[in-house]
Amino acid sequence: MIQVIVFDLNGVLFPTPRQINNQVYDFVKEYKSLGYMLVIASNASKGSFEWRNSKFGLMDIFDGRIISSDIGMRKPSKKFFQYMIDVLGHKPEEILFVDDSDVNIKTASDLGIKCIKYEDESSLDKIREYLEDDREE
């Protein structure tokens, strides 16, 4: 059963560097209230992440962050995703990773992480359906 939802920052939560996707942001808040652990995983620079966090209060909603500039590894390396699994303390099959990059999704999936590709706001419906089905199993 999915315990953790990990969101990419660039392309999913932020379609452009200074503009948040309000539909994704509202989705995150909704699923936070349902008890999921929510985490950001990004190749963003430390300064870029800190600016977005201070402007939008990301860490008031998200439970954690895995930022490449903090850990010295970048997506799509297997080391980045293995670090993510280790630091989250959950089995790969308990993690749902949402990203807009095929190569990131392939690497995460190869390690057993459940993945959904974010293409546009309709992807949020796919995530909802996936999580509803997961809770019913």
Image (spheres, helix red, strand yellow):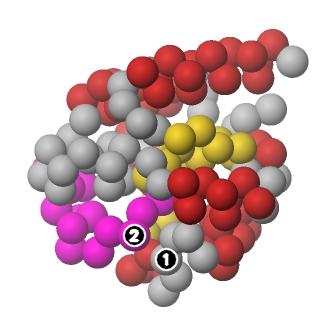
Q: Earlier in the sequence, mark 2 or mark 1?
A: 2
Question: Can residue 62 be seen from the camera position used here?
Answer: yes
Left or right of residue 75, residue 28 in this image: left
**Which image quarter: residue 130?**
top right
Question: Can residue 57 be seen from the camera position used here?
Answer: no
Residue at position x 56%, y 61% in the image: 104
Q: Position of residue 121 (x, y in %)?
A: 36, 25
Using the image, determine if residue 137 lies above or below residue 41. above
Left or right of residue 129, residue 121 in this image: left
**Which image quarter: residue 110?**
bottom right
Residue at position x 81%, y 13% in the image: 136
Instruction: Give me the disc on residue 74.
Output: 1
Instruction: Tell me which amino acid carries mark 1.
Output: Arg
Question: Label 2 belongs to which residue?
Answer: 43
Residue at position x 42%, y 31% in the image: 28
Residue interval drawn in magenta:
37-55
Task: State the residue in front, 70 or 128.
Answer: 128
